[in-house]
Structure formats: C-alpha cells, structure tokens
Image (cartoon, rainbow, N blue to C red):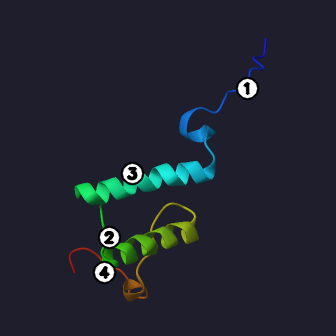
Amino acid sequence: MVNLERKERRGFASMSPEKQREIASKGGRAAHQKGTAHEWTSEEARSAGRKGGQISRGGRGRLIEPADTMGTAPQPMGE
C-alpha cells in the first residue's frame, strides 16, 4: 500500500523566508562579535568565484586549465 501522508515542513523550513533571514542574520552577527566568523580576503573571494565559474561552465565537475598554461604541449617525462 502506498503511504499518502504528506511530510510536514518543520523547524527552519516551516518559517517564512523573512524569518529565516532574520535568524541567520543574528547568527552571523554573533559569530563576528565572538571572533569566529570567517572574513574573506579579496584574493580568497576572487579564487572561490573563479573556481565556481569554471566548474559551472565545464559542467563536468572539473576545473578548466588556466589561460597561461593553455597552448603549451605537455613534455614527455624524461626529456
């Protein structure tokens, strides 16, 4: 027999997006006050954005070679 019960949304999922945002914001502020929040440097953010863009463009879950190494043929080992 098929179970026709609908799974109820509970906890965070049952809240409105505004309420979720409010609670998440409080958590972020608390982490910053406590000193445990991660703050990205501009280089870290740039690198993360680049990796995400490369993966989404490739669609296969692997990074695309950086432009500076493209066009150079790999050298055989031992030469």
Question: Which numbered tag is attached to residue 75?
Answer: 4
Q: Which residue is mark 2?
A: 40
* N-term-proximal mark, 3 vs 4: 3
Image quadrant assignment for residue 72: bottom left
* N-term-proximal mark, 4 vs 1: 1
* Kind of residue at disc 3: Gly
Label 3 to label 4: alpha-carbon separation: 52 Å
Of marks 3 and 4, the one in the foreground: 3
In this view, which residue lies farthest toward the left?
78
Label 4 to label 1: alpha-carbon separation: 60 Å
Closest to the observer, 69 or 16: 16
Which quadrant of the rendered structure holds the N terminus? top right
**Secondary element at tag 1:** loop
Label 3 to label 1: alpha-carbon separation: 31 Å
* Kind of residue at disc 1: Arg
* Kind of residue at disc 2: Trp
Binning the other alpha carbons within 10 Å of mark 2 as few (below 14), some (14 to 19) or many (20 upward) gives few
Label 1 near label 4: C-beta < 8 Å? Answer: no
Label 1 to label 2: alpha-carbon separation: 41 Å
